[in-house]
Image (cartoon, helix red, strand yellow):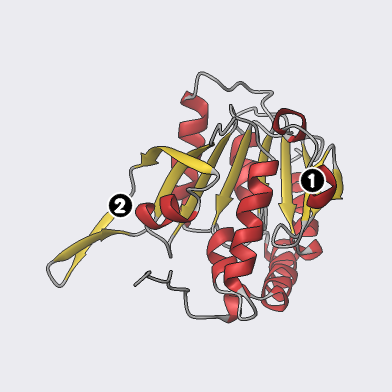
């Protein structure tokens, strides 16, 4: 018997309306209380990703870096403060992009970030700042398609996995689109609290190969131990 991959229980955290309201509320918090909102998974998760990027000898301060599901932009802001200059935030909520733009302007870094409204669970990808249907790119070579040296995901794949409508289809479209955005030298760093490293490796295995797992805090409960989050570094598989 073939084992069927188990889906996560659906949640409001997987819906557009929820996040649209969250980012509108956080915009109010930024304006009224100088508070940009939650740093997803905490500052330590951000620091692990930023530290890995700064130590990677294949990257430099001008490498193109995409944050998928950028939300309030705090992950990209941390990179901007490390003098990375080619940063792009992508989210399907315009309210998130408005908030991230305001956060960067508040820090006097508005000249650095650029922002794209795209839903990577649909059949679209980003190329040269524009949205294209993936079917229209089938005949384009992988090296020509890629526009980012680094792609980041801190919680976005988790949210997609909780979508009440069709989380499996959404995850499959997301993985396909991520592969289109990268070439064989690009890196994809994903942080998840819902999926383990082995599960992420399995789910992304058709398109990506795991090259490193970043250390994360552990906890013990009932005689078992685990990690609060999984942070994985993938590269695109060279299938040619």
Question: Between residues 80 and 52, which one lies in front from this camera angle?
Answer: 52
Residue at the location (64% across, 47% down)?
178
For the residues marked 1 and 2, what is the alpha-carbon distance in whole angstroms? 34 Å
* 74 displayed left or right of 231: right
Is disc 2 placed on a helix, strand or loop?
loop
Q: Give the residue at x 58% y 26%.
A: 185
Q: Residue lying farthest front?
A: 1
Q: Quadrant of residue 169?
A: bottom right
Left or right of 59 on screen, residue 15 = right
Mark 1 crowd level (few <14, some 14–19, many ≥20, 10 Å Cα): many
Tell me where residue 17 appears, x and y as whole percent.
72, 78
Residue designated by label 1: 126
Of residues 37 and 146, the one drawn nearer to the viewer in this rendering:
146
Quarter occupied by the C terminus: top right
Q: Position of residue 153 (x, y in %)?
A: 57, 50
**Rendered image quadrant of residue 182:** top right
* Viewer-side label of 1, 2: 1
Residue at 76%, 35% (x, y): give it. 145
Which sits earlier in the primary sequence, circle 1 or circle 2? 1
* Residue lying farthest to the left in this orientation: 223
Residue 21 point in image, percent of width and height: 72, 76
Say what secondary structure mark 1 lies in. strand
Q: Specify whether residue 103 is in view.
A: no
- In the picture of the structure, the residue carrying the numbered disc 2 is 217
Looking at the figure, which quarter contains the N terminus? Answer: bottom left
Tell me if residue 75 can be seen.
Answer: yes
> Which residue is nearer to you in this view: 168 or 30?
168
Question: x, y percentage for residue 127?
Answer: 81, 40
């Amino acid at each position: 018997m073939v084992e069927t991959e188990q889906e996560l229980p659906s949640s409001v955290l997987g819906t557009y309306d929820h996040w649209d309201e969250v980012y509108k509320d956080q915009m109010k918090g930024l304006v009224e209380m100088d508070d940009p909102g939650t740093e997803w998974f905490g500052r330590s998760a951000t620091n692990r990703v930023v530290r890995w990027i700064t130590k990677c000898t294949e990257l430099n301060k001008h490498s193109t870096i995409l944050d998928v599901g950028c939300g309030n932009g705090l992950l990209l802001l941390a990179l901007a403060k490390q003098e990375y200059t080619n940063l792009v935030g992508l989210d399907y909520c315009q309210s998130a992009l408005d908030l991230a733009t305001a956060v960067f302007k508040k820090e006097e870094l508005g000249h650095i970030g650029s922002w794209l409204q795209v839903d990577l669970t649909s059949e679209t990808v980003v190329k040269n700042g524009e949205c294209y249907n993936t079917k229209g790119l089938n005949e384009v070579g992988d090296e020509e398609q890629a526009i980012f040296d680094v792609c980041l995901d801190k919680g976005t794949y988790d949210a997609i996995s909780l979508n009440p409508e069709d989380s499996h289809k959404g995850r499959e479209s997301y993985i396909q689109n991520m592969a289109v955005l990268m070439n064989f030298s690009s890196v994809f760093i994903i942080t998840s609290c819902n999926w383990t490293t082995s599960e992420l490796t399995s789910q992304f295995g058709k398109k990506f190969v795991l090259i490193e797992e970043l250390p994360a805090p552990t906890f013990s409960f009932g005689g078992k131990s685990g990690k609060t989050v999984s942070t994985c570094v993938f590269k695109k598989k060279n299938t040619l």
